[in-house]
Each structure stands twice: as structure tokens, then as C-alpha cells.
Image (cartoon, coloured by chain):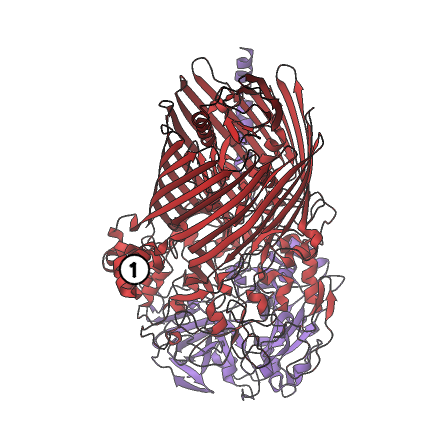
Amino acid sequence: MKTMKFIIHNSKFIIATALVALFAACTPDEPTKLYISEAEADAMIEAGTCLTIEEFKAAYMTEEGNYCMPDLYRERSKAGNYYLFSIDTIPVSDTPIYMRGRVTTDDYAGNFYKTLCIQQMVGGKQQALRLSVDAGSIGGLYQLGQEILIRVDGLAIGRYANQPQLCLPSYNNNIYANKAEEKVGWAAGRIPFAIFKARTQCIGTPDKSKLYYDTLKITDYNHITSLIEARSWDAKLVCIENVHFTGQLDNNGTPKNCTNGDPEIDTEANVFAPTTENMNYPQGRIIKDAQDKWTLVSTSEYAKYAHFYLPANNYWGNVVGILGFYYDNGKNYSKYPPEASDWSISIRSLDDLQLYDGDDHWLYDANGNYKPGYEYSKN
Amino acid sequence: MRKTIIAVFLTIAAVLGAKAQTRLIGRLISVEQQAIEGATITLANQSLSTTTNDEGKFSLTYLDAIDEEVIVEAYGYISDILLVQLVENQLTDLGDIVLQPDISTELKEEVILNLAEIDLNDDEGKSQSMSSASSASQDVFNATISYAWSNARYRGRGYEQIYEQNYIEGISFNSAERGQFNFSAMGGLNDATRYREVVEGMEASNFTFGSWGKSTNYMQSATNYAQGWKVGLAGTNRNYKGAARATYSSGLMENGWAFTAQLAWRYTPYIDVKGQIGEGISYSSVGYFFTAEKQWGKDKRLSLITFGAPTRRGQSSALTQETYDLTNQYNKTSWGYNNYNPYWGYQNGKVRNSRIVHSYDPTVIASFDWKINEQNFLKAGVGYHYSMYSNSALTFYNATDPRPDYYRNLPSFLWDGQIDKNGNWINESYDGDKLGQGGDSHYGYVGPSIDMNTYNTLVDLWTSRDDKATQIDWDALYAANNANNVNNPNGSARYIVERRHNDIQEGMINLNYRNTAVENLTITAGLEVKGSQGIHYKTVDDLLGGNQWIDVDPFAERDIKELATNIGLTQADIANVKQNDMRNPNACITDHGRFGYDYRINMINAKLWAQNEWNWNNVDLYYGLQFTYSSIQRTTDMLNGRAWYLAKLNPDYAFYYLANNADAVLNSDINALPTRLKGYTYHFVDPAVKVGATYKIDGRNQIKVNAMAETKAPLGRDAYLSPRVHDRATESIYRHANPVAYAQMYGTSVLEEYFGASQKIAGGDLTYSFNYPLVRGRVTGFFTQFWNGTELNGYYDDEARTFVNQSLTGINRRHMGVEAAAAVKLGMYFTLTGVLSVGDYRYTSNALAITSAENGMALADESDRAANDLTQGPIFELRDSVLIKGLRVATGPQVNASLKLSFFHPKMWFADVTVNYFDWNFLDYAPARRMQGLFTGVRADGSHVNGSYIDSEINAIAKDENGNTMYDKYGVPVLNYPYNLHSAQESLVDGNVLNRFLVDVSVGKLIYLPNRQSISINLTVNNLLNNTHFKTGGYQQARLPRQTKQGLTNNKIVSVISPNAWKFPSKYYYAWGTNFYLNIQYKF
């Protein structure tokens, strides 16, 4: 009886306690540290140094590089007085050196492989850099629009085919590569994932709306043949306005019509990236503007949409992607001096092709659904 | 055994009937005054023995009047020897003989059962060899090895567990699908497994026809248990830290009922000490066991039994030598430091394991014993159990592999490409310039082409056991999903924890009849019927903060380009291929929803057997015959896109993939099909025959011989090439199902085709045993030949760059060896026991492999087809020989030896120290590394291999001085270093002989208290000398490292086998370092 009275008298307290206990028991352990806040990032930066992307390149990227590269004198490595391949290691600093930027790439569709591009707005202008990381689907952890803070001392900055990138030295000993005699040797290599992860923090959640697109005409960049100037354009997120696919490919600087062949065996098939006959390089397909100026859309043969047919030439609009200037002057490549076809746009997914014929989008039907077979986009 | 002795007893009565009645009687009781039933009483000098009845009494008549040695043996009790002078024509009454309980063995069994439970269902690589429950035998060999060799994963005569039989109250509990017994069903319930009959190998038995390994019948009737309470506590530093048990038994009450119940609890929280045994593991198990028995007189009794042990336990992983060495740098001072486990990581600062096993086998049994009369006995039983077994694992979609020990995350990945064809570090540039000297990292020397700064940074992360580099970074996985929710709220989560369910429900009926009406003959017959259903599916266990999981096959999606090749399907059609369920495309799965696959294997298994045992004065003889009917059928609730794709691609063989549903799936509305799509049912009938004899030279020496032959239908788990995807069965099963047609097609016999799917086994053993006052033991030689075994493997293929399934058939192997044991009494208190087993278990033929991609893609181009192959199109199923002839079967050490010094004091002190030596222990081979095509460039089906050892780019094939290819004695080309490391079968034995020893000690005391109470304490310490180099098992990774050769035409990826034999190294399980088990038990 006494017990019953006690229970009734204290029922509210008991119920409340039970509910709290139940709630505590049912609440899953949520991780607290999904990312760092702006304030935490600022505090980290305050304890060290933070460089803009261009400051970082200027401070550490030299023409010849500081890392042992006995192969620098190969024809592939040098173009005139400029070195297309280099490595500069950055010594570990007592006070950390940081660089921050927002991720502009996504590898869902398979057109970027073990590469992140980041951008940073400085004085209203876009600065950009490639990050070479040895992790497949790295975009799953560092997603489109995600701002990141990277500690760069202890890493390296290098160039691969004139494209600047955050990297670590790696000896490329692929003796089975085509023209291996030009390629085997030290090069800007991928940063092992564990090392990259230990040095990289996500700041907040991704925000694609904060991505900046340099809206360009083809003529804004494809006349640039200065290797030095091209380095500052490389890796930028751009939007090329009022263009269309022509169903052509680049044939040593001249457009050539694609064929209707089987992309498994025909290197000139009318798809984004048919076979390379095992050469494993990205393939270019021509887009032209109203002035008949052209540039290439570059697609890896490992992209999920590689064998999808090109948009018909009656679909006009914008093409968004990462601007690249890839200049590889190897023996027998015979491409000196640089030219327009060294420039290309790498799209992140088919969604980057904002092409219309009137109201008809090339990718979606009238209901906003993907046309059959074209669903490798989304991100 | 009991049956044998009853028969012998009758034989004595018949043959010696003319003698005068010199008699010996007595009664065996426990210290609790409970009668001991089934004990063996042997007169060593007269070749006579008998067993005690249910009152513990025995009687031997018509004896010679001599000085006799009476050997008293009972399972669970310490054996006793009584010296008796028998007087002619007189009755000698030994009165009550009190046997002391063998507490030491009883308490050790929990340790062995714990090991068995851990090893079972290991789903990484092939199942580890494991030790089953200890033997109940009084045989010196079996009684010693069950504990001493369990830590080394010894398997008797090298037989896998499918060749052992496990019964409960006469009902078979070996799974029809996996062929194994699930020890975790009775996890921690030591009383549920305490009483049992064990028959070694093919010997005569009264509850089973038997098999090649031992057959065990767990007897769980309530009257087996002593009346009263028993409570126990245990502490250990193994995979759980504490255990508690309580058992109550009513004893047989006046109303004829008896009840026994046990509750058992085992627990450890997550172990958050790196380097400690069981790091990153949690364990929680509650077991219940209840048995009720009703007796009607002495002739009939009914037992009703139920038990189960819901268990959740974290798992640990096999390790490569590199991760073992790197992580051994850490925390070396604690007990046993070789315990790195990559399966766990910190989530919000707390330990979380990604691999959590959930198991629960609720079981009910009803068993009825009916002694019809003195000559006829019938035992009938029904049973049902639902085995819920699931294991969790991380899976990911378009995101970085989260495994910390993924090969690309290890320092050794930097070696890739830096090793030349001779296995040395490259030290010259392409132009021949010196690259430098290389350097010494914290983990050994690396070549000059490796950047030391990068390498040492990685090594430092590993040797310091960095949380984010060496464990799962749960917070990063949540962060990725969180970011994905922002960017793509309707998309698939990047990471989830999935749960792979492998449930089995089984219903069993058993009838066992025994007849002793004919003098000297015991007839035993049995009928065992089992209906079984294996239920396999995946669920989302935890979305890790993601919004949902979209159910498509990521490999099929990734390879969509290849899938579109050569088949003339539209891109919209091709998009179907990635669907795991075409009737529910792009299914949006939330927590606990099913996805991936959802199929069942239905099986019926019926055995009818009979056995005759003849028992004469000096000779016992038995023979038996068994017929087994079994059937297998796959059904699926998901219509897999790859099954549809393959059927559409090969319309003439659409039945392979969709069975009877092929036409409807390809030509009708798939949504109109029934929910459950049924495959073909395959029926098998398999005979078995056995025979054996014992010749008793005298009361102390005997010779025994056993022989058996049988055919064995494939298990459900091995019958299908890719059961998650489609109905395609192994080739031999199709031929079995249509033997006449195939016999005509191939010019073979119908019988050959009919039994072509079944394994054939024949073998026997020969034993000499002796039993003297000071020494007893035996020597056995055995030989067993297996033909046409089957096996299913799955692995990631580096050439195809996708997950493949591989079905192996035609596996022949031979197990032969010698077992020997002797126990010598050293004075009053000590016994020295020596035990030895030397085996030679090896494959005697090559096997045939059929390999197909799980994502449906072709594995070779049309241009790779053999010149005489007129079939068009790419090759989806590769057929090749697996060159395994001469390799050792990986079933634990094949040389095992122990020397054990035991101490027993009548005041119930007991102790022992055992020194064990193990050798000839071999790693399981990966079939993918032993393919004929790798060695010759051409597969058995004539197709061309893209990248083989004969390629001129590499110097892999060894040549003699004349430039001719060298072959080993089995006809396999010899490979040069380092390529030979790819394919050689590894030894698990450490190079240092001292590291092949394990030393165990045990000490205990039984204290009797007033009023029949007692306390027993036992401490066992295993691996006393902390040998952390002892490998107990592992597997060779199937993935073969390759490089791609650029620049060739006709669109071939020309693959070159890499000399980097360290890229996908073998993985090993190690024995725990020093570990203990302290057990305290109180009876009242």
C-alpha cells in the first residue's frame, strides 16, 4: 500500500524520468564532427598561414621544380623554355600553411578520376587548382560545392602536361604505356588518400549556389598559347554560351565528321568517347558557337555516358565544365606550338550540357524526365 | 557404443551359457548419489564389457575366476580401475562405485565451443577451419586433442564440418544448405551440449548411419541432469569478458515429470584498447534452454525441448602480413599485441564495429522413446528451427572505399610499378641512369623510385595507429551522406551499413528402430526427413544519416558501356541491366528495407538407412546401407536485371537464367508474373554402404577395421553459379537432370551422367588399440578418397574489373594419415600423454571452373574464342581447368603433436600442462591464380587468355639450359621469382621452429561442501608463452595484379601480369596471444 501511495504521489516525476530515460536510450549516437564551422576554420587559419590559390602557386611552383627529375630533358617534358612537367615539394612548416577553396568537380558520371578541382574567389575573380588524390570516387567525400581547407606544407605542387596540381612526387614506371620512353620517370603524382584526408577539413556543408562560373566565349581563351598564361586558366569552372555539338572530332586541328560506327571498335564514332584502342586518353568532340569558333568537350572513355550519342546539332545552349589546357609535347606527339585544340571543357555530367531546340531539352522529355538511356547525371 | 555393449552382453550370455555362474555386479553413482547410466565396464583380462542401466547397475556372468582389472569409464567422470579377485561360482558385488566428476574437461568444453561459434559462418574467403565440440570419447587420442588442438583449428583427418553429423535427441541438425551444424544455436548453454553420444567416423552407431568425421548426438532429456541448482561465473580476456550461467533441474518427480532449465549470459562492451585481444569487438548473448520429460513407467518417455541464444557479436578481420607488421609496432607491452582489427572505428568518439553478426536459432524438439519390449526399441522425434543469421558490412555507392586496409591505403601500394621482373626494386631510369640508393623507412628498405617522405608519412600513420587512417572513419561517412542530402536529397546515400541475411528454416522428422531379437545380432534402422529453406536477402541496417538507398547494382551501372556491346539492345534496355529488381526499378530503400537480392533455396532431404551388428566372443562385425533422396530448388522474389539481360542475349539458353519463367519474362508483362518466381527442382538419389569388424586379440588388445563408400549430392550453397542473380546451376546438375540426352550427346553412360553431379567418397581405417594398467592408447591408419567435389567462390577479378562468381566441379582429393596416442601412468598422481597425428591431405586432380561476371558483362571478346569455336559473340562464361593437383587441402595443421602432463589428486586437485607442436599447415589456394589459361595462354575451352605467364613481356616461365619450359611433377609450368609467389600455395607455418609451439596450462579444484554442495574452480591459460606468430588460417586473395599495355589495336585491353606479388597478398588469421579463461561453478 505504501508503495502504491509513493508511486501515485510521484507519478509525474516517475513518468518524466522514464520518458527521459527512454528518450536517451532511443536517441542514436549521432556524430558531432561532420565538418568544421567557418569560425573553426578561421581559428585554424589564424594559427598558421592561408594562401590564395594564386599566392600558393606563385610561392611554391617553380619552372623547373625542386624535386629530382632526371627526365626533365626529354622532349615531352619541355616546350621551348618552359617545363610542362615539374614537382616542387613544400617543406613541413612549424606553422601550418593552408589553402581553401570550393570543390567544382563531381565524379559520379565518371569523367573525373581521382581529381578534385577547387575554386576560390579573390577580388571577384576566380582562381582554381587541380588536386590529385589517389582515391576513386573522391567526390563522394568532397562533394560539389563543398568548401575545404587543406594544409599544404608537406605536400607538393607540380605540373602534368602544363596543368598545375597539388600532388606528391611519384615515379611513373608504366613501361607498358604508349611512348613509355617519354613517360617513365618522376612526375606529379597522386596524394595517397590517407595523407590527403589527414590534411583536409570540410567547412560547413556543400553549397552549389556559391559556385562561380566564368561565363566565356570560346574566343576568350582558345587563342591563348602562352604556357604561363594557360596555367592560370586551367581548372576554372566555366560556362560557354550559345554553342552546339557539331558531330565532329578534332583531326590534328581540323574538324572531322564522326562516323555512325560501333563505339567499341570505331575511334571516330558519333558518341562522347568511343574506344581509344586501349590508349586510355580522354576524347574530344567539337562544340561551335555562332561565329563558327570551336572548342572540344573532353570525355573519358570510362565515363558512364561515354558511348551515348552526341546531342544533335540543332540543340543549342550553354556548356558548363572545367576548362583545361593539356599540353603534352612528347616525342612523336608533334604538336608544338600550342594551339586551340589543347583547350577543352570537361563536363561533370550530362546535366552540364544545357542544350535546347526551342523548348525541347536534349536530355529531358516534356515531363522533365530523362529521355531513355540518358540518366547518368543527377549530381 | 551402448548398443554394442548390450549386444556383447547378450553374446556372453549365449556363448558362455555352459559355464558355471561366476558373477560380478555393481552400481555406478555420482558423488550426488545419482545413478550413472551408460557407463562402460570392461574386464581387461577377459575381453568382456558391459554398460550400466538406467539405475547405474551392471552385471557380468559366466566369468573366468581370475584376478581381474575392472575398468570403469563414463563420460563426464574420471575413469577408475578396480582390481578384483573373481572366485569361481561366486557372486562378487562391488557395491556402489562412486565416480568423481571430470570437472576439468567439463569446464574446458566451454572454451572449445566458444571457438567453434566464432569460426562458424566466417564469410570472408572460405570458412575457416574450425574445431567442433569436444569429444565425449574415452579414447586417449580423441579425449586429448579436442582441447589441445582446438586453438590451432585442427580438423580430424582433415575433414570439413560437412562430413560430421550432429544430432539432437536423434534428429539431424546439419543444415541441408550448408551441410554444417550451427554451434552458436546453443551458444553459452553448456548444459545443452553436456550429454552426448559420439561415434568416431564410420563406426557402427545406434542413432545414425554415420559419416567420415565424427557423429554426435546431444542428449537433452531432463533426467540426464542432476537434481538441484548450478550457477557459474566466468571471466576471460577472449572475445567476451564475462559470462554467467544458472541451471536448475528438478530430477525425476513422482508424477513422472522432470524439468531442466538453463539461462546463460555472456557479454563484453566494445573493447577500446588498440592491440588488445578482441579490439573493436562487442559481444552480447543471452541463452535459454528448457527441457521437460515425462516418463510412463520405464518403457516410454517424452521429451520436449526448446533452446536459443540470441547473440550479437562483432567480428575481426584477417590481416595481411604488412598490416600485421605495421600495427605490431603499437602497444607492444600489453598481452598479445597482434590484434589489429580494421572492422571498427570511432563514431562520435565511441567504438563501432562495421561487422556485427546477429544470430538466433529458436529451436523446438519433441522426442519420444518407446521400449516396446526387451528386443525392440523405437525412438521418434520431430524438430523445427529457424536459424536467423545475418552479418553487417559497409557498402558504398559512388564514394571512396571506406576500408582502412584497402590495398590502396597501405604504404605498400607505393611499391606498385616499382618492382622489376626479377622481383627487385627498380633502381635505374628508363635510360639506364641510376635513380639513387633508396632508403630505410621505419618499415624496412624501399627502393629509390619511392618517395621516402610520402612513404614514411604513410608508415607513421599506421605504426601510430592513427584513428582515421587505420580504422573506419565513421564520422566521415556520416559527413558524406550529410553532404549528399544537401546536394542530392533524392539520390542514393553514399555509404550505408547493409545486413546480409542467410536464414534457414528447417523441419525434421526422425524415426529410429532397434531390434535385438536374433541372437548376437542388433538391427538398427532409421528414417530422417528434413524440409529446409534457405532464405537470403539484404537489408539496410543503417543509412548512416543518408536519406535513402537506391537499389541498383553499382558494378552493372559502372560497366554499362561494356554491357551495351554487341547485343543490339537499346540504351533504355541496357538501363534495365543495373536493376536488382526490374519489377521495382530504382527502388528507394529506407532503414531495414530489403534490397539487392531476395532468393530462397528449397531443399528436401530424406535418408533411409539400416545397419546390422553381429557380436561374437572375439569378433564384432557390422554392415550398413543408406539411401539419400535430396532435392534443390531456387526461387526468387526479385527479377534481376542481369538475369533478364543474359536471357535476352542468349534466347536459346534463357532457361539457364530464368528457368520456367524465361518465356514469360522475355515476352510478357513482367508485372503480371507471380511474386515468387520458381526455378527448376533437381532431384538426387545417393547410396552409401559401410562395413567394419573388430578382432579382440585379448582383453587388452584389439584390431578394428572400417570401410565406407557413398555418393553425396551437391549442397544447396554450391549448386548455383550466381544464386543472387539467376537460376543458372552448375553444368553437372543439368546433365544429371537429363542423363539420357547427355549420355547420347557425349557418348557416356546414363549412370555416369546421373551421378555426375554428386561427390563420390570411399575410404577406411585400421586401428590397433591396447589397454594396460600403466599404458593405454592406439594407432590408426586412415585413407579416404573424394571424387568430384563442388565449390562456389566469388571474387573481384582484376582483368575483368568486376566481381565474378566461379563454380568449381570435379575436385578430387585424398586424405590419408596416421593417428597415435598413448597415456602412461607415472605413479599415483601423474599421467603423461603423447598424441600424434600426421596427415597428407591433398588434391589428386585438377578441377573445372566456370567463371561468370555477377554484373552480367562478357568476360572475353568474340575474337578470344577458340579457332574451332563457331559460336558468335563475346564469352560470358569462361571454362578452364584449375591446376590444383598436388596442392594441400587447407583444413588445419596436418602434423599435430602434443605432450601432456596431467596431475590429479584424490582431494580433487587437477592440473595439466600441454606442449603442442603444429606443422604442415597450408593456406587455402585461390582458384583464380591456378587457372590453366594463366600458365598456357589458352583456357580449357580453347579461348585465348588476355595476359598470361607465357607473355614475352615478362620473364615468368622458368626454362632449362636448353630453353625448354620446366614443369613440376604435376605438369604445371614452373614460374620464376617473383611470379611464382602469385600462384604458389603458402605455408602458414612460421620459419622459426619455436613459433610452431603452443603451450597451455590448466589448474582446478573441486571443493565438496556439506549437503551435497560443491564449488569448482578452473583456470586455463592458452598460449602461455604468448606466441603471436602462429597463423591459424587465412586465404589467398583471388585478385591477380595486372598492368595494362597501351597502344595495341583491335580494342583489346592487353593485360600483363604484374611482378608485384605484394599488391594483393594473402590474408591470415592469427592465434590469440596469451589468453585465459577462469570458471567458477557452485552446485547446491
- Would you say residue B492 is visible in this rendering? no
Q: B893 above or below A188?
A: above
Residue reaching furthest to the right:
A94
Q: Nearer the viewer, residue B331 or B807?
A: B807
Q: Which chain is red?
A: B
What residue is rendered at 69% in x and 46% in y? B336
Q: Dot 1 lies on which element?
A: loop
Residue reaching furthest to the top:
A1
Image x and y of residue B864, in percent: 40, 75
Chain A, colour shown: purple
Image x and y of residue A84, in percent: 62, 81
What residue is rendered at 57% in x and 71% in y? B975
Q: Is residue B987 left or right of residue A371?
A: right
Q: Is residue B190 left or right of residue B676?
A: right
- Would you say residue B252 is visible in this rendering? yes
Image x and y of residue B745, in percent: 27, 65
Q: Amino acid at mark 1?
A: Ser
Image x and y of residue B330, in percent: 71, 52
Q: Chain of mark 1?
A: B
What residue is rendered at 56% in x and 11% in y? A2
Indicate the quadrant where residue B240 lies: top right
Q: Nearer the viewer, residue A124 or B285?
A: B285
Q: Residues within 10 Å of mark 1 (few under 14, many from 20)?
A: few
Residue, disc 1: B749
Q: B943 above or below B708?
A: below
Q: Nearer the viewer, residue A102 or B385?
A: B385
Q: A335 above or below B163?
A: below
